Image: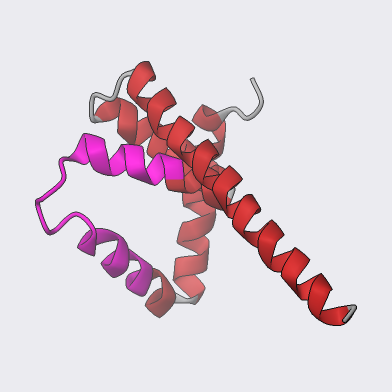
Amino acid sequence: MLIDTQDYAPKLLEAIGKLGAVAPATLAGFQALDGAAARTGKLDARTRELIALAVAVTTRCDGCIALHSAAAAKAGASQEEVAEALSVAIALNAGAALVYSARALDAFGQQSG
């Protein structure tokens, strides 16, 4: 096990609570933003959590992975659905590396000539 999410998630939520105690407007703003994503009603909870989990991978957020993997399981996502969502994240990260590699090569070309 790389990270014990069962142990990490509660500690993370406690730490976020402490941050919220000293920066309540920041936490309230985040909670409003987070809640707004679910208000449209166009996507079901399972789909939203699969998207959130894939985004968590692309942003490299261990806390997001811990929280959204639990939420995806609670929403009824299967291991196969999670793997497919993660496959999209992997492909997207590779695509981003390709795009930024082209930009870096272009930037290099601007310097040498």
Q: Does any portion of residue 25 appear in the rendered image? A: yes
Tell me which corner region of the image, top left, top right, bottom left or bottom right, holds residue 82: top left
Quarter of the C terminus within the rendering: bottom right
The colour scheme used here is: secondary structure
**87 up-or-down from 52: above or below:** above
Q: Residue at x 47, y 31 (%)?
A: 87
Magenta: main secondary structure: helix
Question: Is-magenta flag for residue 44?
Answer: yes
**Along the line of sight, the residue nearer the viewer: 95 or 35:** 95
Q: Residue at x 80, y 80 (%)?
A: 110
Specify the farthest residue to the front.
113
Q: Residue at x 53, y 43 (%)?
A: 57
- Give the tally of numbered discs: 0
Give left or right: position of 43 versus 81: left
Asked if one can make out residue 61 in the rendered structure from this viewpoint, the answer is no
Q: Which residues are magenta?
A: 28-54
Q: Quadrant of the N terminus?
A: top right
Q: Residue furthest left?
A: 41
* Farthest right residue in view: 112
Residue 17 pos. (x, y %) = 46, 59
Q: Is residue 45 above or below residue 113?
A: above
Determine which quarter of the picture holds residue 44: top left
Q: Relative to residue 84, is residue 10 depicted above or below?
A: below
Residue at 50% across / 28% down in the picture?
Answer: 6
What x and y, as percent, mark residue 69? 41, 33
Viewer-side residue, 58 vs 3:
58
**Residue 106 lies in magenta, yes or no?**
no
Question: Where in the figure is residue 54, as x and y percent of width and height?
Answer: 44, 41
Query: Which of 9 and 88 lies nearest the eye of the viewer?
Result: 88
**Quadrant location of residue 39?**
bottom left
